[in-house]
Amino acid sequence: MGEHFLKIFWKVAVTFVVICPALSQSYIKYKDPTGNFSTLVYDSESENIFIGGLNKVYRLDAGDLRLIVQGDIGPKLDNPECQTPPPAECAFERTFRNNSNKLLLQFGDKIISCGTVNRGTCEFLYSSNLTIIGQLVSPPVINTDGNSVAMITQNSGDEPNLYIGTPAAIDPDLPPFTTRSLVDFEVQKSMLQKSQKKASDSHIRQGFKMDFIHGFNSNNVNYYVVVYDENYSQTIPNYQTYIAHTCESDQTYKVSYIELPLVCNHKGQKYMLAQSAYLANRVPSEPNTSSLILVVTFGMSENGASSIPERKSAVCVYSLSDKIEYSFLNAYKECSQGNTTFKTVQWAGSNQHPCVSNQLWEKILVDEQVPYCHYLEQIPDLGGDAPIVADAIYQENDTLFTSVTFQYVDEVQESVIFLGDDKGDLVKLRLNSLTSAQKYETKTIDAGSTVIRNGLMLSKDNDSIYVTTKQQITKVPVEECEQYTTCSECLGVGGGVGDPYCGWCTLMNRCTRKNDNECTGAYKDGENRWLNNFDQCISITDIEPANLPSDMQIELTLTVRSLPSGTPQSYFCVFEDIKTMPVLAIDNTKESPTLTCETPPEVEIVKPDGFRKVNLSILSNETNMEFVSSEFVFYDCSAFQDCTNCVSSNFACDWCIYENECTGNSLKCKLQGVVGGKGNAQTNATKFGPDKCPRLKKRDTEILLSVDTKRPIEVVAQNLPMLETGQEGYECVIGEEVVRAEVMVNNTIRCEPKQYSYSDQEQEKPIVLKVRWNGNFMIDNPDKVTVTLYKCDVNRTTCGKCLLADSKYECGWCNQVMCRYKDHCQNGAPFLNGNVVCPNPKIISFSPLKGPIEGGTQLIIKGENLGLAFNDTESIMVDNVNCVTEEEGYIPSEQLQCTLSSTPTRLSSWVKVKISKESTTYSATSEEKYSFVIPEVTKIEPTLGPMSGGTDVILEGDNLDAGTSVNVTIADQPCLDIQRKEDGTIHCVTSPVITNVTIGDVVLMIDNGKDDSNVMFYYKTDPTITKILPGHAIASGGTRVQVKGLNLHVAKKKILTMTIDSQEFRGECFNASSLGVSMTCKAPNISAKFMPLEEANYMSIPEYGFILDGVTKYQSLDGEYPPFEYFVDPEYFDLEDNEYNKNEDENLIIPGRNLNLASQKEDVQVKIGKGVCEVKDIGLLHLTCKPPEDQPKSLDGSDGAAEVIVYHGNLNFSVGLLKYYKWPLPLPLEQMIAIAAILIIVILIIVGFCIYRCKAGRSEQKITQFRQQLDQLEMKVAQECKEAFAELQIEIELPTNEEYENQGIPYREFRSCILRVLFPDQPDHPILRDLPENGVRSEKVDMGLQQFGSLINNKTFLLLFIRTLESQSSFTIKDKSNVASLLIVVLQSKMDYATDILKVLLADLIEKGVDQDRARLLMRRNESVAEKFVSNWLSFLLHSYLQESAAAPLYRLFRAIKIHVERGPVDAVTADARYSLNEGKLIREILEYETLNIYAIGLDPAKDPVEVKVLSIDTIMQAKEKIMDALYKNVPYSQRPSPDTVELEWKNTSGRLTLQDENDYTKGDGEWKRLNTLSVYEIRNGASITLINKQGCNSTLTHPRYMNSHVTSSPSRSMSPMLGQGDSENSVKVCHLVKHGDNDNQEGDRGNRMVSEIFLTRLLYTKGALQKFVDELFATILNVRREAANVPLPIKYLFDYFDDQAKENGITNPEVVHAWKSNSLPLRFWVNLIKNPDVIFDIHKSDAVDACLSIIGQTLMDSCSVSEHQLTKESPSSKLLYAKDIPNYKKLVAEYYTEIQRRPAVSDQEMNRVLGDHSTKHKYDFHEQTALNELYYTYVRKYREIILSGLESDEFAQKNKLSFKFEQVEHLMNETNV
């Protein structure tokens, strides 16, 4: 009986523990507070969910419930009296009415929506964007008064049909059952004729109602579950549920219609109101059987009297064929036999006709089978009173199940019913049979809301269920097995019912689904790998023996219930962290198998416990996990230090008195001194138990001893041993004091007298008494007999406090000086004790200091020696006024309380107290005087308020701080919440008054004093509100709201309130006009709760109001006024021009967005320094204001530029500095600088020439020659200046975004992209392949790698492994990068775990940086595994975001650079270019060339030629690449023919010529040899060049001389002419446009040489051409002008982690955290992508393009730096080029970081969901086993000894036996190499 009770209790407890946490579970959801959801459709093909609601239809992504699009279906123009919808005319005025969706269906790529307007018409919506298709004028389809159902079915070859079931209506055009066209919703067939009959029935017209619950189709039969009043024509209603069917083959609805009542019984009660229904497939279909069942939830209605159910629910299940269809067929058969129970349906016609016998019909029906479609017109519209009855499978009170769905769990062949109720709960039932189900879990999804009818729906993969309430849809997993951490929790859900989805994976020690791939062997019956029965839970049920001495080693036998099948070698016994022992044997012959293993040789026991409980677990060799455990006890008798504990233990221990030890072998002890313990087989004791131990007996009284008092102490003992010869006697130990003791009669121990003391300032100190003998043998003291030492003088500084001490201490007041123990007071000195009066009473203070002359003031007096009892107070007087004492506030000796009597006049005197007892009297007088005064009110503020009260008033006057109690009345009504302030005023709140009271006296009562002054308060009529304008504001509030009304000035407190989710936000109101007809309020700031609708910029708040003192009418305006709307906050951007020209620009324009959504110009103020810019206009994107005439001073009073600040509501924006324009410049500053530089250079050249001429003294011929050279140089300088000027002025044409989109972006797929991030130099890394299947790879290798993977998944091991490697000097930066990349591959399927490791590594790195004062350098140099890990982590998680956002602008930038660079000459050897951003890669001489338009023919000559632009000085390879770019512009680079495999062929007048970079045409120039160009071949405009396959190896590219100087995959990238080691001095060098490496010719030939800086304007030209692309890329990267919601969760999560780490490490410098963020995201991620776009795109990046990308990447790096670099004219051009742009970029970076920081924190659950989705999606992209193999053989083998040493020395590693597991891996991996 007891075991059964405990079992039930345990199940209930487990259920409570398991279910409760689920209540607060957070799930994916979509919420719209105004949605009023009513219908739900799931499109499994697109995996979208469509929801119908109030005026809206929503399309959500089924995965994350993200709103994709929202369509408007209302409000619409309508009038219920209008018979046809617009545009048809109507005699009644149409107004806009809300349209609530009643039906929602999907039909192909359309959505059908039927609503409550226009008499229930329907419309088609595009499913993609939910816009209405066309202007279809639909006839009425549904009755808007009630619920309808619809189905779309299609037989093979037939057109699809729309079947509608809708409540019967009077309108003959709206029958209850119709088949309608899916083109125009016109009726194709219906019960039309019967509806016309029904229309003439007056009873039906007066209120016949039908409620369609559910509709479905099966085997070409349509079924309807409907509720209606079968007594609709009678007085007493009777609401019943009916199930009806009609056959699709019945074209007229005339014969096949049949309905029968559907009833659900539970314990004699009938549940007859269906609430929801679902057709389910219970088991896999079998031949000739039906598996379809109808699950229906019912509500209770007593006798069917109401259509509104009670909150009692039942669930019934009906077999479709065996129950429902059988009943239908049987009804027809019974009708044919004349059974009058059945008759025609009353509501379908004017009369009912009972069945009559007909043998012909009977004969026809006898052989019919289900499902039966009736076709005999003689038995139409059959109904009856023979209900289809089922017993409830489940019933529950106090709830109403409003929705139901069903799932058959194939893996366990179980069925689950999901129920939604009216409390927002999801209830789960386990279906045992068609008559029984058990609830196993309830989850609160949307508390307080009702799950809508049919609002439960399973996802496509059946792993989730969608729960829909009026305002919210939630995605809930069908199971959450992982939340259960023990077998009993996993299998004990629902009080032992169990979750059908969940079972216990024994060897994994986890709760999983049976189909979880990690639970191997789950489907093997009888092997106990996966358990799903509570009684099966694996456990160690018995251990024999149950405990063991710590120094004994024996074999243990463990009995294990549900032990998985296996051999002894499969398991180990783990004795905590002591030792792991192998299993010796397993016996499977018993019901519960047993296994045997040895105990450890010796176990250390910590004294004085005497035993050690260890966790004995069984370890699986297969999973390397401990999967079951129990407690085992090792004990050591010698560890017990006293007899009582020794013999009271459960171990085989005895106490040897004379040996003073606890032992398991008492045979060695003296017999008379042995006290036996429990169960010791080797004992020789004759007495047993703790009662036989030598010990002190418990005392009834305590031992008290005053300090410094010499007195003996006596205690009674028992079982004292007889002292033997040579043994020492007894001693008492009190604290640190030891005294001799003797044993008296009756075993009384007497401790010798001694004085004791203690230093603590405490009144008493208890000390446990110890008695010992024979030196250190202790007598037990189990009851803790204690000696209490005490001090009389501690905290008893007065006589009164001393005499209040407990009499047991014998303390008294000695010599009128101090409190002493009676024996310590000097002889003859006065000693007071007992109940006497103390001398020298004293008044220290009293309050209050004054009161009214009428008395009644309660006086509190505090002092010393004020009597030990209340009656000791003889009198309290103030002058001659008596104060009556009160016992209530009396504190002995310290406080008196009394109430003063009255006095006729004002007076002031001392307080006097008399204390007396018997004949002794003492008195005390106060130092301060008490004053009797007259309080008086002279003023009240305000003087008026509303009749509803609630006005805060302030009373001013004289002596208002007197007395104790205060009461104020105004107009005979109490003033509430009275408070006295330090300034002497009284504050209170007026009460409401009746309507005829307009004025009232202010009466003040202080104690007994009353002031009936002439101060008056006026009551005015309550304020009224008539208008609120505008009805909107910005989210941050502060904008003005004008309120119109009457008497608004009457209320003192005027506040506008907004309520969101029970949280109230307030905004003050002010400027109420003197007449009270208007006031202005500031809109409250609701930004903390602002959640605009998806795809919208506003939020409606229906719950708002006004606090107007005590007026309640306007506290909530919900329903009386339209909802108040809050719009997104405005944003103001920086000024586009920081100079203001008052002569030209009359106004200042400030850009922004969302500026006037909810604001007017009056809401905005603009200040320029100390001046004001008058706001003239505010638009959506711009604000216009007029600045002051003169330059305003800055805020600090200085001249110059002043800060412009925009104040918009509660927001303010600094938009830049403004300076008034003074000196106009003729040209833009950049152009002027360039021209000025050129002029200066020219002047310097001329001056230099003049100086040279003066000093040279050369011949006239040389002077002439020099002049000619100078003239040429000047001409070339002029030419270059002119070209540079023209280039700067001419707008550059680069492809538009549309051109890029049409061309397409060649993205690399995830795997290829990530590989280039992880291993940039290894495009064919082994992780792309599985380990080879050969002799080396064996089963043990797989097992070894699997166990090594398990170690990697152990946090302790992995962190120790990384730290150990990083501590080695031989572990290079390349190794760190390689390890980080291999680890991210190993953990690709566990990104949540990888993130956890990343956080720990970063924390270590930050802490190390802080310790070394190098915190700012984190992530700067990529010197650790953690830094590379961050790069990899970001690359993994941001790949999809990259493709969605920044990839397109990056590709556009790359293409723009490539096109722009290739417009000018590019040296094929050095990659120097005419147009570049990199000064080091700039061609610094003038080249003569022309642009040629040629026609290229591809390898397929049938295709049309393509026009290509080339340069006359392009090499053949350069021309070839441009031609291939044109021919293959839409083809990724890797899919194009390699340039090495094709040649160019030119057909001229001489024939066909193959163009080559090097051949006989190649010109030599000494040691230099120039590559051929198109001009060498004299190719002209319009030439046709054909691309052909290469015929031989005659290209320069494969010439042996250049084999070491080019990249095979991209020959034009590098054709370096540097000679190999084998080249001789006479070898020829290759050049193209310039001869590099030769200092004499680096800048052209001597005759052509110019100052190289003259070409720097080309940098400006290139920068200008690319500026918009750079800006676009940076804006995208930094989220500029975009919603911050686009910030990916990983970035927010990482940045928040940096912020948290800064706080934890005490870093307060924001620049440090800024540097961390910049080094991690821009530097490690974005800059890498900018410099290497070929990582994400399948493109070829030339060196010339790479040089430009490097400058842009460096610009982003500089923009992210917080350091300010001082630039001078000596600074490199790469720094100067973007010097003016970088401050703006820096501002964008700071704003981006700030915006991310403002975003709500990412919860671990949200992040884990993202990580889990990523892991699932990419878990198989790379081969984990291969990565493990690389890690092991590259690093583990190399550092094996160091790793093992670290594992053995680490505490946690020891606890988890990691060194043992590591050695196992070593053993397995090493065996394969033997």
Image (cartoon, rainbow, N blue to C red):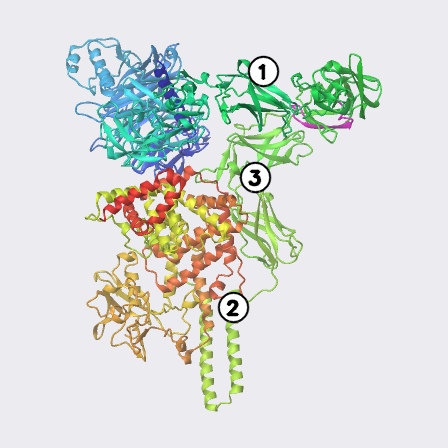
Give the mark nearest the N terminus, 1 or 2.
1
Amino acid on which the number 3 mark rests in the picture: Gly
Determine the CA span between mark 3 and mark 1: 73 Å
Amino acid on which the number 2 mark rests in the picture: Glu
In this figure, which residue is indicated by the disc labeled 3? 1037
Measuring from the top left, give residue 4's x and y in whole percent: 34, 16
Q: Magenta segment: does it hold 959?
A: yes
Residues shaded magenta: 946-963
Front position in the image: 887 or 401: 887
Q: In the picture shown, does residue 1527 fall above or below 1? A: below
Measuring from the top left, give residue 404's x and y in whole percent: 34, 24
**Secondary structure of the residue carrying numbered label 1:** loop
Q: Is residue 615 left or right of residue 567?
A: right
Choose top left, top right, bottom left or bottom right for residue 195.
Answer: top left
In this figure, which residue is indicated by the disc labeled 1? 701
Mark 1–mark 2 CB contact (< 8 Å): no
**Secondary structure of the residue carrying numbered label 3:** loop
Amino acid on which the number 1 mark rests in the picture: Thr
Q: In the picture shown, does residue 1518 fall above or below 1427? A: below
* Mark whose residue sits in front, 3 or 2: 2
**Secondary structure of the residue carrying numbered label 2:** loop
Measuring from the top left, give residue 30's x and y in whole percent: 41, 34
Q: In the picture shown, does residue 1342 fall above or below 1421? A: above
Instruction: Indicate which disc residue 1770 carries.
Output: 2
Choose top left, top right, bottom left or bottom right for residue 832.
Answer: top right
* Residue 191 visible, this angle: no
Front position in the image: 811 or 1366: 811
